[in-house]
Amino acid sequence: MIAFENAAYSYSGGELLSDVSLRLAPGSFHFLTGPSGSGKSTFLKLAYAELLPTTGRVTLFDRDVTSLSRDDVARTRRRIGIVHQDCKFLDHLSLAANMALPFTVSERESAPQDLDDLLDWVGLSHLSSALPPQLSGGERQRAALARAVIVDPDVILADEPTGNVDWEMSLRILTLLVELNRMGKTILMATHDLNLIRQAKAQLQARVLRISNHRIQLAGADL
């Protein structure tokens, strides 16, 4: 699905990620952890072709990212839902209108019931007409997750989706990601919250990856 083969990425001549080899299998759940600045966001950007590896190889759905045209990248990203920590919305549009935006760049036709169901799933039906500035941090993160899955992607990449919310809301967002995984979605979630990882591992089989010394390692039982 998404595979790294001896991939590396450098900023201004300094290597941030080195010799990364791993595969995100269909239906798997991965956590990515490590200190701030260790390369978690960079790894995610490599995983959806926002960045290209400096050396080595990254493949998305069996295609080398360096061989993809701009249109190919756009089509490929329709199979990948991305949740950014600093989720951005168009402040002049309602929550429902913001949620429907992915349909404007997809080849699918919008089904109003899909949107209603998604808003209900993330507990935001009562805020469908609200403007983004009226939403709390937790509501914005749940809306961002719903927007990421509205076109039914195969993979969800979430960059610190619980970084700006309290523990109760973190658990709620985790529950939504676990539900998506049980529906067959591949999940990769970057987080610094080891307690949240422990909570998840009590519910499902999750692989924990740790960035250390520019490399990605499989974390052990210390979590």
Image (tube, grey):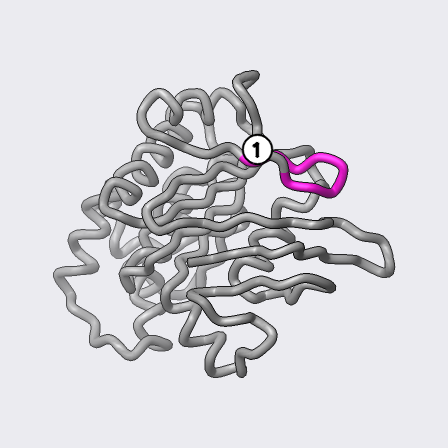
- Crowding near the residue tagged with mark 1, few <14, some 14–19, many ≥20 C-alpha atoms within 10 Å: few
The location of residue 219, given as percent across then percent down, is 57, 28
Name the residue at the left extreme: 113
Q: Residue at x 32, y 52 (%)?
A: 146
Q: Identify the residue under disc 1.
A: 218
Residue 95 shown left or right of residue 216 in the figure: left
Q: What are the residue bounds of the magenta stretch?
A: 209-216
The spot of residue 91 in percent (x, y) is 44, 61
In this rendered view, identify the residue nearer to me: 109 or 218.
218
What amino acid type is highlighted by mark number 1? Answer: Leu
Q: Residue at x 51, y 32 (%)?
A: 208
Left or right of 32, for residue 198: left
x and y, in percent, of residue 66 in the image: 60, 74
**As drawn, which residue projects farthest toward the top?**
222
Does 61 sit above or below residue 68?
above
Q: Residue furthest right?
A: 13
Residue drawn at x 54%, y 58% is 47
Q: Secondary structure at mark 1?
A: strand
- Which of these two is toward me, 143 or 134? 143
> Is 176 above or below relative to 86?
above
What quarter of the picture does the N terminus occupy?
Answer: bottom left
Dividing the picture into quarters, in which one does residue 192 lie?
A: top right
